[in-house]
């Protein structure tokens, strides 16, 4: 089984422009994320899945510099972009998250893959981890099935395609309580999220990307002032995500199959 880590990344953000290539200590956020994912030895490929839009060209330049792959696909249809990238690199299974999560929990990826192998789930989630730590395990054949039945080209918010139809098997991995933090936010969407990550790297140093999930959480436990920098952003993010999901339910492919 060939496994790839596909990072969904574009430079179209308006809330925090070109956030993936903002720098911390002279290195782009996406580059730090690549460094972190390379810590997991289960990946056959690391792929930056971006779009054909000319504005996203810097993403492929960084991929080349960092020794990973780049795939350019649909601007709007994220699921098609991921599927075509999987085909391009002959992948059977993918781990996916957006470039918003530079400190993704690489040390839980083996748990996701193990869960898939035991359950044959179409989608494996890890939602009990803090936002920004979790990632998704997706069976490539399940991606193909979604593409066959969906009716909307814009699939930026795609979770409901798997969870609301009854057509797919979804399993959430078991996460020990010591790793669960409902109020911690390690995702990059807003200016204060950027300030949060800069503070984390200042506090933990340039080896931050090498730190285990447990070490990062312990650091944040001991520095509540850093946690508070962007804590309020999580509620804003959830409201936006819920509205996007509502629109998918109302106008997307669900109207044809539910």
Image (cartoon, rainbow, N blue to C red):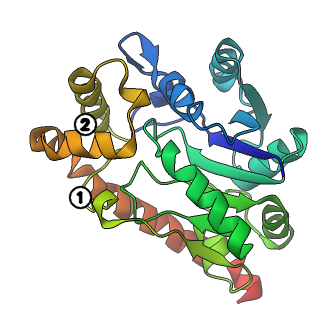
Q: Residue at x 12, y 39 (%)?
A: 223
Q: Is residue 35 left or right of residue 148?
A: left
Which numbered disc, 2 or 1, marks the residue closer to the eye? Answer: 1
Residue that lies at the very extreme toward the bottom in this rendered image: 258
Give the class, few, some or many, for how many residues have Cα within 10 Å of label 2's Cα (few <14, many ≥20).
some
Residue 188 occupies quadrant: top left
Q: Looking at the picture, does residue 167 appear above or below residue 155?
A: below
Q: Which mark is residue 192?
A: 2
Give the class, few, some or many, for how many residues have Cα within 10 Å of label 1's Cα (few <14, many ≥20).
some
Q: Is residue 142 left or right of residue 203?
A: right
Q: Looking at the picture, does residue 53 appear above or below residue 174?
A: above
SS for callout 1: loop
Residue 136 occupies quadrant: bottom right
Residue 216 pos. (x, y %): 30, 40
Q: Residue at x 70, y 60 (%)?
A: 138
Residue 38 pos. (x, y %): 60, 30
Q: Residue at x 84, y 52 (%)?
A: 1
Q: Which mark is residue 150?
A: none
Residue 217 pos. (x, y %): 27, 46
Quote the CA–CA distance across marks 2 and 1.
15 Å
Q: Is residue 142 left or right of residue 99?
A: right
N-terminal label among 2 and 1: 1
SS for callout 2: helix
Q: Looking at the picture, does residue 127 appear above or below residue 82?
A: below
Residue on which disc 1 sits: 183
Q: Is residue 2 left or right of residue 37?
A: right
């Amino acid at each position: 089984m060939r496994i790839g880590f596909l990072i969904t990344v574009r430079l179209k953000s308006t809330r925090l422009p070109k956030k993936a290539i903002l720098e911390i200590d002279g290195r782009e956020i996406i580059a730090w994320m690549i460094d972190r994912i390379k810590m997991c030895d289960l990946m056959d490929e690391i792929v930056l899945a971006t779009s054909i839009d000319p504005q996203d060209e810097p993403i492929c330049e960084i991929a080349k510099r960092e020794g990973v792959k780049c795939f350019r696909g649909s601007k709007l249809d994220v699921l098609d972009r991921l599927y075509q990238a999987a085909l391009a690199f002959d992948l059977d299974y993918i781990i996916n998250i957006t470039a918003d999560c530079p400190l993704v929990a690489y040390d839980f990826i083996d748990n996701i893959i193990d869960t898939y192998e035991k359950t044959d789930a179409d989608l494996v989630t890890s939602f009990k981890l803090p936002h920004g730590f979790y990632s998704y395990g997706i069976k490539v054949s399940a991606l193909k099935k979604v593409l066959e039945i969906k009716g909307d080209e814009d699939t930026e918010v795609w979770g409901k395609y798997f969870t609301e139809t009854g057509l797919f098997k979804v399993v959430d991995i078991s996460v020990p309580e010591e790793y669960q933090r409902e109020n911690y936010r390690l995702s990059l969407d807003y200016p204060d999220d950027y300030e949060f990550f800069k503070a984390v790297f200042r506090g933990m140093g340039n080896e931050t990307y090498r730190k285990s999930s447990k070490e990062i959480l312990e650091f944040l436990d001991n520095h509540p002032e850093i946690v508070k920098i962007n804590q309020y952003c999580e509620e804003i993010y959830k409201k936006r995500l819920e509205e996007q999901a509502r629109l998918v339910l109302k106008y997307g492919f669900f109207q044809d199959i539910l």
